[in-house]
Image: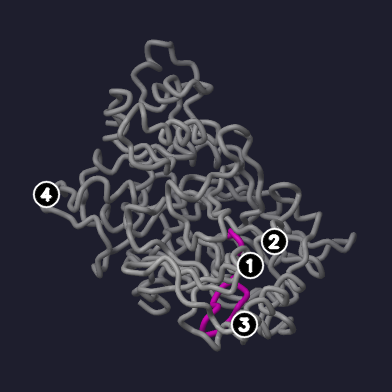
Amino acid sequence: MPGHTTRRTFLATTTSTVVMSGAGASAQQPTIDAELAKRNRDMADLMISEFKLDPVNRGLGNTTAPIIGGDNTRPGKIQAARDMIKGQPGYRYFQWPDQDSETFDYGHIVQMGAEVQADGGAKLNTSLTADEFDVTPTLLRRMMAANFFDESLDVAHAGYAKAGRRVVVALRGAQIVSGADGKTGAIRLREARPNHREPLCVFIAWLRSEDGASDLVSAYSGSTVPSEIYLALHQTTPENNNLRASMMPQGLHLRVVGNMNLPKTVHANTLRQHSRTPVIRERNRNNSSFKVGVSTWDPDVSGMTAEIVGAHIHAAFWGNDPLWKYSSAGCQVINGVVTNNVASGEIAEFYKAMDIPVATKSDGGSYTSAKYGVVYPLALLSGREARLHAQGANLLAMRRVRIGSSVKIVGLSNEAKAAIPIAQIQNRLRVSQDGRFGPTGLLKLVELQADRQHHANPFPDGVITPAFAQRVWQISLG
């Protein structure tokens, strides 16, 4: 895979040593030369100077790392930093875990075993494959049902008719093969493993019709994981806590059309984070990847109050750079550039598919359009799950409860609620029994999963599988 290496490095800047990770790597390598250490310190200094914090664009702790610049707008210090890294194309500050079992996204899949049974009796590989598969509206509906997202989608659209029943489906770890421009029929994909350097995710604009017979879909390339250039800042300058990158967990989230305020400009038509969720962070500068059981959830279970951390959907900005093809500190980005609030590339086509018009300046000088304030659901899942569903994996085996999962329980008797899995799970976790698995339920779940004295769940990944629900609570997700 391009950009993927088996032995990767990142700089531990408290010394001039390079810490190695990956299969067969030793704990520490010989001291690197002073020039290499200086180059990386310079890179960090340049990036910190360029990526100013903007109090208007508030995030966790009232700070966030806004994204500015790009090849066509502000090369400056960003270009100098990129040139430093381009001189060492194999040098890695941050990486995707080599083992699927260590990831927040695939761990719950490979825990099912090396194979999962298809409805027709075939055995499907749960690890990364080169198989191509078709994404259709029927497949999307199957995935929504498997994750208990249907009720959440209905509630989101009921209050926001202007969205026109449009949904964003993001598949973490996927690539477009063909059919991206078609509005109907199938989109051909293959799964991929993200690497924080290339845009290895797919965004699907889905017009979800009332009867299910006239759905429209189109696909765009991008990323749902933070880019290594932000993660490098944390690794090279651990004392600068204001530039912490994060990763959104898979689930059903909400985004609202508005402006993203940057230090010297505004990115209009951003799909801003609207619903609260815990995020995944790696706080230890000696760790080089997000690993379940090692990286942490923010907030932790002692806080229990998830924030709006500024995880928006916007343009990737970086253009055609051979290494840094997108820029994200935790946002979801779609290939393309926004210059002077004019979108080009795939992000412009995405806006058209989502029926989001070009924003114009109001009399007061701020950007706006008829869709500002309109909320769109974002179903964030994985290419691995999409492939297994497309190949006919047993639906019960693929059931998941994760943030955004919900069922309608309003008006039901206590007896009726007792028969509904999500309500049962909320009861066991001692959170509000409203049928919606939200941030508090997720944090309570992570706390339970981390308590290994009481059960055998390997990692606190925030995902409830049928096996986990049965083993821990004797609850069936069927």
- Name the residue located 69 percent from the left edge and 79 percent from the top edge: 42
Q: Are marks 2 and 1 in contact (CB under 8 Å)?
A: yes
Circles 4 and 1, Cβ within 8 Å, touching? The answer is no
- Structural distance between the alpha carbons of marks 2 and 1: 11 Å
Query: How many C-alpha atoms fall within 10 Å of the one at disc 4: few (<14), some, or many (≥20)?
Result: few
**Spatial CA span between label 2 and label 3:** 17 Å
Looking at the rendering, which quadrant does residue 157 occupy?
top right
The quarter of the rendered structure image containing the N terminus is bottom left
**For the magenta stretch, what is the residue range?**
316-331
Q: Which residue is mark 1?
A: 233
| Dot 1 amino acid type | Leu
Q: Residue under circle 3?
A: 82
Of all residues, the one furthest to the left in this rendering is 121
Which of the marked residues, 4 or 1, is nearer the chain's N terminus?
Answer: 4
Label 4 to label 1: alpha-carbon separation:
49 Å
Instruction: Tell me which secondary structure the magenta stretch mostly adopts.
Output: loop
Q: Is residue 30 above or below residue 173?
A: below
* Residue depicted at x 74% and y 53%: 63
Question: Which of labels 3 and 1 is toward the front?
Answer: 1
User: Circle 4 sits on which residue?
Assistant: 120
| Mark in the foreground, 2 or 1 | 1
Give the distance between the C-alpha atoms of the residues marked 4 and 3, in whole angstroms: 50 Å
Please name which of the two marks, 4 or 2, marks the residue nearer to the observer.
Answer: 2
| Type of amino acid at the residue the image marks with label 3 | Arg
Q: Earlier in the sequence, mark 4 or mark 3?
A: 3
Residue 317 can be seen, yes or no: yes
